[in-house]
Structures are given as C-alpha cells and as structure tokens.
Amino acid sequence: MARGALKPLHESDFEYWSTHHLLNRAGFGGTPGQVRALTNMGLENAVDYIVDYQGVSMAAVEADRFDEDIMRPRSDAERNEIAMARQAGNEAVVERLRLQRQAAQRADRQQMREIQIWWLARMIETPRPLEEKLTLFWHGHFATSYRKIEDSYHMFRQNQMFRAGATGSFKALAHDIIRDPAMLKYLDNNRNVRRSPNENLARELMELFTLGEGNAYTEQDIKEGARALTGYTYDDNNFVFAERAHDSGPKRILGKIGNYNGEDFVNIILTKRACSEFLCLKLYRFFVNDMPGEPTGAARKFIIELAKLFRDTNYSIKAVLKTMFTSAHFYEQENVASMIKSPIQLIIEAIRSLRTPTRNLAALVGAGDLMGQNIFYPPSVKGWPGGRTWINTSTLFVRQNLLVYLLTGRRPDAYPWEKDGSNYDAMHLIEHLRDETGAIDVEQAVVYLLRFTLGREPHRTRVDELKNFVKTHGNEINNTLLVALLSLITAMPEYQLC
C-alpha cells in the first residue's frame, strides 16, 4: 500500500461527494444514481471498476464504419496515365484526374466531420468513460491536426491507437507514435532521410512528448535522434521502414553511443528520470489540478512519488491512475472543483450527468470549435493550452448558450418557438429527495442541485438566490421550474469548474 504523498484515502472518507468528484475527473460526470452505485462499491472497487474498464461491454456503442481508401495514393497505372498525358499535352486527361482528386478531398473532409460526430457520440454513450477521457488526453498530448494531414482515416487510426493503448504502457505508446502515419506526416518524418535529416519528430518527441522543453537533452541530441528516425515513413495507411533512407551509422544520444534506430531512441529517452516526471506532471494537470506555474509543496511531492511509481512499473499508465484516484491527495478540497472544464468536458459532462437530450451532434461539434476545442484540429503540436485560456468573453457566452440549448433545445440563432430534439425531464436529479409523502423540500433541493452541478458546497448567497427564485414562481418544485433553475446555475461562473 502506498505511503507518503501517495497514501490512499481512508475507506470511511469515501462518500457520495468523493464519488461525484471521481466521476467528474476520471470521466465526464455521472447521474445521481451512478454516483450512489459507485459509492456503495467502496473506494478500491470503484476505482478498479473505472480503470479496469476492459471488462465492460461496448455492445451498445456504434462501431467504426469509415472508408480507408478515400485518400489512397494513385496507382502505378494512374501515375503513368497522368505522366503520359502531361507529356503529350493532353489537358483533358490531366483535368479529369485533377477533378477526381478534388472530389476525393471533398469526400475526405466530409468523412472527417463524420468521425468528429462519431467520437463525440462515443464519449456521450460509452459505459467506459475513462477510456474516452484518456483518448482525449493522448490526442492533446501527441497532438496532430487534420488540417495538415488531410487524410481522415489516418486521424481515425491514430484515435483508435490512443484508445487501445490508453491505460497500457507509455513505453508501447511512445513506440507506436513514431510509427503512426498521421504523426509521421504531421511532423514531416516522411521527409527524414539520411542525406537530409528532418529534426521535427525528434525535437517534439523530446520537447513535448517525453522530457519537456529543455529537460535533460541538448540540440545535438535532437540532431542525433533525427538520424535515428531516418527512414521512418508510411505507404498509404501503413508504417514503412525505408532501409535505404535510414542512417545506420553510430549516433550519440543522451550520452549513449550506438547504431541506433527509432526504437532505440525511444528506449534511451525512457531511461531518463525527467521523462516520468514530465508525464506525471501532465497527468496531474489533466486529472488533479491544472494550477499555473511549477508545482510546489504537496503537489510537487505527489508528482515526484508518482513518477517513481511510473518508472518502477515500467511506465504502466494503469498503475499511475489507480494510485492517483485512490490517493487522499486527489480528494483534498483544493483539488475539488478547481479545474476549468474544457469545452469537450463541458458538453459531455452536462449530457451525461444531467442526462439532457443529446440534441444535434453536428451543432455540438461546432460549439466545441467556437469554445476553442475542435477535436482532430488541435491548434499546434503543443495541443490545447487549457486552463484559463478556455475562458474569455466570447467563449463564456457560447458556454452559456450551449447549456441553454442542451436544457431547452433552443438555439441562439433560431426563433423562440423553434427547438431541437425532445423536451428534457430533469426530475430524475432530485427524485431521491422525496419524503414519505412524496414532497420535495425546496431548500434541500436547491442545496443539492447546487452541490451536484457546481461540485462543492455552495455559498449561502447562491442558495438564497435560488430559493427566492422558487418562491416567486410558486414555491413548489416541478420540471419546468427545475429546468429554469438549472439554466440559472449553469450560467454561474462556478459551473465552469469541475
């Protein structure tokens, strides 16, 4: 059993609101019934259920159905045809093949939109929320964008790779990423050949994916790492090692000398303590607290001890997550409702915890974009900055409109009488508060709703504001009033936190 900074929360301290916090962070929230069910399992069993999700059936979630050949390379016959047409000045043939390519690009952009909708639906529907939460984490960590790759199936394959390795070994995931066609294209490693090494992948592998900017490596290490990655390319949808393009000579990387290839390069990086600490810091900021600046005090001790566990378990992501989610530190008050929800967290958590209708998925993808998180289109290789960058006057306005849309079906760009989807029944949120006569106490309902939606004990001022609202609207809780209350609560600044 872990001691020191990683000591577990005592079982007796794991109660309803602890579970509520766990579900928000290790997934996208849960309904009151789901919170109660997990609380009854106890801490270790609840964490095991969330993290060991492979045994949970995915039968109810739609499988993939995407075309892998839309952006296939031209065949030898097609290349010969266009070469001969150009040589003969046959513009009609050249134009026909150009139009075919443009049609394929349009179809691929449409498929990319369908993949976005598919993933959003999967995050909403999945009975394994941590799997999708981690897929989102790795998508932001190993950030690649369709805007440059222009092959939707490559993006989909990468997404599936992150999902398959989400809780496995980071070592395996790092090996997979240097063979991933989307990443190889995004960082130009398909142009990395021994006569003209391209440093992009080697640089970002060290700087952004494993060690952290300026940690434990030099510019010379990047140059030597680039040589190790020469010849790592792809053909259509598959990784290819082009041996003729590979520099097989000796290389000096992080103080070690050998005729290294890409796999050797990754293995050498993983021997550095800085690697485990950098990764645990990123996991900490994603799941525990995204405080600005360098961590200090208890947070720093927690990260250092977690990093040691990471190394000792040969980079087991699952071991780190289980220790994190059972730790007393994870449940301390300064880490509860302390993180600004990402746009995707905001969307999915509202639907999953409040159980609103899903409405129009394409509209939700568009709202994510307006709020700064367009999935499959991270702004740079650094991913999304997160934290306070999620909130500004423009995005806050969209956030509030989004919740009104989910709760009522009313879109800000439509007439008041126009609605998307079905009416929302919110009474399930407070059914458990009914007394033996079937009545629901107004104060109890208001306090519970605030605590459930805001994630922590509400300020008395907020309770009084909502009680007065109920009083002026009949002083009795019904579904119409409950939806109105939720519309007010979700417009509060505190609702932006989880």
Image: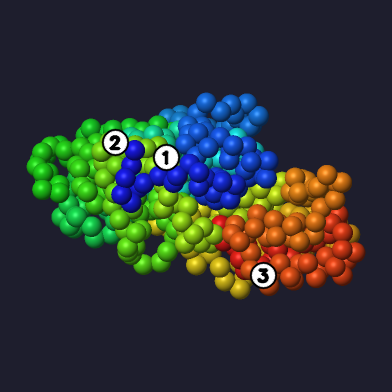
Quadrant in which the N terminus appears = top left
Q: Where does label 1 land, which residue?
A: 322
- Distance between the Cα atoms at labels 1 and 2? 12 Å
Residue positioned 30% across, 42% down in the render? 310
Q: Verify CB contact (< 8 Å) between mark 2 and mark 3.
A: no
Locate residue 116, reporting x and y percent. 59, 45
**Front residue of 41 and 351:** 41
Residue 368 in sight: no
Q: Earlier in the sequence, mark 2 or mark 3?
A: 2
Which amino acid type corresponds to the residue marked 1 in the rendered image? Lys
Mark 1 and mark 3: Cα distance apart in space: 35 Å
Q: How crowded is mark 1: few (under 14 residues within 10 Å), some or many (20 or more)?
A: some
Q: Nearer the viewer, residue 338 or 126?
A: 338
Residues at circles 1 and 2 in contact by the CB criterion of under 8 Å: no
The quarter in which the C terminus is drawn is bottom right
Q: Can you tell which of label 2 and label 3 is closer to the viewer? A: 3
Residue topped by disc 3:
460
Residue situated in front as seen by the camera: 195 or 208: 208
Q: Between marks 2 and 3, how big is the CA–CA gap?
A: 46 Å
Q: Which mark is residue 240?
A: none
Q: What residue type is labelled 2?
A: Thr
The circle on residue 313 is: 2
Image x and y of residue 158, in percent: 45, 39
Tell me which residue sits at (58%, 26%) in the image: 57
Give the secondary structure at mark 3.
Answer: helix
> Image quadrant of residue 496?
bottom right
Q: Which amino acid does label 3 sit on?
A: Arg
Nearer-N-terminus badge (1/3): 1
Residue at 65% in and 54% down: 452
* Residue shown at the point (28%, 59%) measured from the top left: 213
Task: Estimate the x, y position of residue 145 in percent, counting from the top left.
Answer: 47, 51
